[in-house]
Image (cartoon, rainbow, N blue to C red):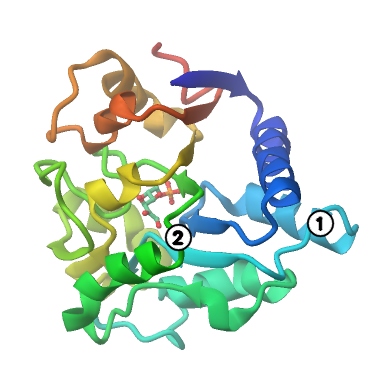
Amino acid sequence: MKIIIDTPEKIAEAAAKRYVELLSEKPDAVLGYATGSTPLDLYAELARLNRAGEITFKDVTTFNLDEYVGLDGTHDQSYRYFMDKNLFEKIDVDMAKTHVPSGMDVDKAAEYDKAIEAAGGIDLQLLGIGNNGHIGFNEPGTPFGSVTHVVELTKSTREANKRFFSSIDEVPTHAVTMGIKTVMNARKIIFIALGSAKAPIVREMIKSDVTPEVPASVLLLHPDVEVYLDFEAAALL
Ligand code: F6R
């Protein structure tokens, strides 16, 4: 695990460079994307580089980590909608090759792993971390062998995400998420944590034992993870 500590702006630039490098070597790479506040600067930087002609996404295939159960892609809080607005509509990706788990057709969850495999496996997976250590929506206690599945969201996750909804009652109770094993199968992982609220869990992830109680701690077992932290998120290390 390589740890890089810098400002959010420099982190977005450095992480974007990894995409430039990967796509210049492998233009048809398979990219795993995340939603939430954390990747927004990176997505803006990728869109800028795309406009400037320094990167093209025209041959990539993408798979997102997760989606809320019960929200279809036109709902403005769905993760499909988030990706379309914050990245896909701003870059030259082929929309037909972008995948977000279906929040409506959850019986198809297991097919998501098969689709990833059929595409050749994920070359580069982007991850953020929840305040409780979740990656994707793999909440504490999720077995490390899990593949894409439906989860019940914890109170802490619903509290953290209620900022996007009119009230906590509007926050879906369930989500479909890539499993820990799905994430760990990615050949390379870029992990980003920003802000002081993440400092305690970042410390736990890096300093505690590898345990399902801190799902992100599994990343210590991955051979190629770059951990980008801003100064606030790194403050307790
Ligand atoms: C999002 C995801 C989550 C978030 C995490 C942090 O697709 O899988 O694990 O990365 O909840 O969210 P933010 O970035 O909003 O702090």
**Which image quarter: residue 59?**
bottom right
Q: Pinpoint residue 232: horizontal percent, then vertical percent.
A: 51, 23
Q: Pinpoint residue 39: horizontal percent, then vertical percent.
A: 56, 50
Secondary structure of the residue carrying tag 1 is: helix
Residue ID for mark 2: 120
Q: Pinpoint residue 133: horizontal percent, then vertical percent.
A: 26, 37
Asked if labels 1 and 2 touch by Cβ distance under 8 angstroms, the answer is no
Look at the picture and state if 109 lies above or below 208: below
Secondary structure of the residue carrying tag 2 is: loop
Q: Is residue 43 left or right of residue 194?
A: right
Q: Is residue 33 left or right of residue 111?
A: right
- Nearer to us: label 2 or label 1: 2
Question: In the image, what residue occupies the spot 40% across and 27% down?
Answer: 223
Residue ID for mark 1: 48
| Viewer-side residue, 1 vs 135 | 1
Q: Residue furthest right?
A: 52
Question: In the image, what residue occupies the spot 22% across and 50% down?
Answer: 138
Which quadrant is the N terminus positioned in? Answer: top left
